[in-house]
Image (cartoon, helix red, strand yellow):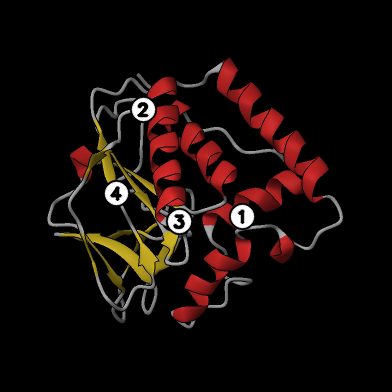
Amino acid sequence: MLPPEPYALTVDAAVPMRCPAFALEDLRVKAGDAALKLAIELLSDEYHAKFAGLEIGQVPGISEVRASYKALGIDPTKTRPSSEALLRRVLKGQGLYTVNTLVDALNFCSLRYLVPFGLYDLAKVQPPVAVRVGQEGEGYEGIRKDRVNVAGRACLADAEGPFGNPTSDSDRTKITLETTRALVVPFLPLSLNEARVKEIMEGTAVTLRNYSA
């Protein structure tokens, strides 16, 4: 398995996360994929059986991601990591919403590894890119939602300003059926060991290519 092509970005020391970003080229994003839909349904069924009766905070991996939020002074039970929000939908029997094959495949990976990711159209990103703490008044228009405030929160920013965070991404850089190049940013807890980081990175890259190549 070839490692994904890394994407150079800086991570501020004040952000308690690892963000080993990578880029994907020559993508062909489709409206949907039956095999991907089935994979998501099977993983959802597995989680229903495995985590039945547990509080969300008892699910392996959830507490580590929550700790990253708490280190920034953010209550993760009020501003939830995207991975936890996906898991909650699944355990409630709501299933995952569908967008397109690239977004759906990344949501599948976020659910599989229980870590939040950001996914962005590289053609809409203006380098340099950094993961930093948002300043007072900073924010962006979210995808299918009102303005997202990132003041005091970990965010991804380019030359035009913030465009993503571990909870929700911006409308400006969203993935569409016209996307051919994508930036993938995992927001990983510092507690993860190198073997687990490698597993997440390589597994995610392969999955995204499989469904959007």
Q: Circle 3 sits on which residue?
A: 168
Q: Does 181 sit above or below residue 149?
A: above
Report, in whole angstroms, how far the alpha carbon at label 4 lies from the one at label 3. 17 Å
The type of residue carrying mark 2 is Met
Image quadrant in which the C terminus is located: top left
In terms of secondary structure, where does tag 4 sit? loop
Q: Nearer the viewer, mark 3 or mark 2?
A: 2
Question: If you read the primary sequence from the N terminus, does the residue marked by circle 4 or circle 3 appear first?
Answer: 4
Disc 1 or disc 2, which is closer to the eye? 2
In contact (CB < 8 Å): disc 2 and disc 4: no
- Give me the C-alpha separation between circle 3 and circle 2: 30 Å
Examine the image and state in which quarter residue 28 appears.
top left
Instruction: Report crowding for label 2: few under 14, some 14 to 19, many 20 or more residues within 10 A (C-alpha).
Output: few
Dot 2 or dot 4: first in sequence order is 2
- Earlier in the chain: of badge 1 and badge 2, it is 2
Task: Estimate the spatial distance between the alpha carbons at disc 2 and disc 4, rounded to whole Å.
Answer: 17 Å
Residue bearing mark 2: 1
Q: Tell me: 122 left or right of 76.
A: left
Viewer-nearest residue: 78 or 198: 198
The residue under label 1 is: 85
Q: Secondary structure at mark 3?
A: loop
Which badge, 3 or 1, comes first in the chain's sequence?
A: 1
Disc 3 residue type? Ser
In what element is the residue under mark 1?
A: helix
